[in-house]
Amino acid sequence: MEYLTRLLKTLKYNPDFNCHPRCAKLNLVQLGFADDLLLFCMGDVISAKLLYACFDSFSKASGLIAKQGKSFIYFGGVAPNILQEILQTLGLQAGTLPFRYLRLSLSSKRLSIGQCQPLLDKMTGRISIWIAKLLSYAGRLQLIKSVLTAIQNLWS
């Protein structure tokens, strides 16, 4: 992954590559966890080609390849003609937003109350269990500070 990270960082020096608008300030191009990888760029053909070429170079060097049946490209606010051109050029399938990643709902828009309902249900469920244990006020406070904050931070 270190090689891929270095390779993707070189994209910021390419004048034709455009970061995703919400990722530009951080120079964020990728997020990875275990054997999953999320790549981000502006929804234009040139940026998508450059990002894909960078990943392809990594694949050839490492022998690790993305499974076409499990790889998707997600769009937010991209014109239909550009969307089709990117899909044809890269040969990937279009995914639909929102989608779940690490049990979280990812979307190009602000999450709705319905999408946050699993978080609320999980927190309410934890509190219900703690009430049944007749914990002291200090004990409940400690659980709220540690467990509920950790759950909320994961979603954030």
Image (spheres, rainbow, N blue to C red):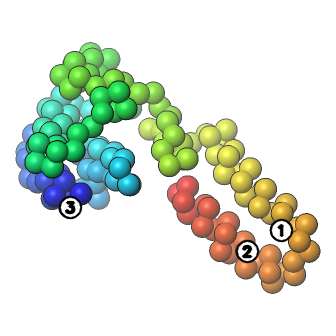
Which quadrant is the N terminus positioned in? bottom left
Distance in Å between CA atoms under marks 2 and 1? 9 Å
Q: Earlier in the sequence, mark 3 or mark 1?
A: 3
* Left or right relative to 92: residue 16: left
Identify residue for label 1.
130
Which mark is on residue 2? 3
Q: Position of residue 31 (x, y in %)?
A: 33, 53
Q: Secondary structure at mark 1?
A: helix
* Left or right relative to 147: residue 140: right
103, 35: nearer the viewer: 35
Residue 117, quarter of picture: top right
Q: Secondary structure at mark 3?
A: helix
Identify residue for label 2.
143
Q: Position of residue 73 (x, y in %)?
A: 33, 31
Tell me the kind of residue under disc 3: Glu
Distance in Å between CA atoms under marks 2 and 3? 37 Å
Q: Mark 3 Cα within 10 Å, few/some/many (few <14, many 20+)?
A: few
Which mark is on residue 20? none
Q: Secondary structure at mark 2?
A: helix
Tell me the kind of residue under disc 2: Leu
Residue in the image at 50% along x and 49% along y: 102
102, 149: nearer the viewer: 102
Residue 21 in the image: above or below residue 96: below
Residue 154 seen anywhere in this rendered image of the structure:
yes
Distance in Å between CA atoms under marks 3 and 1? 42 Å
- Do the residues bearing badges 2 and 1 touch, measured as CB atoms within 8 Å? yes
Residue 44 in the image: above or below residue 118: above
Residue 103 in the image: above or below residue 86: below
Residue in the image at 83% along x and 68% along y: 130
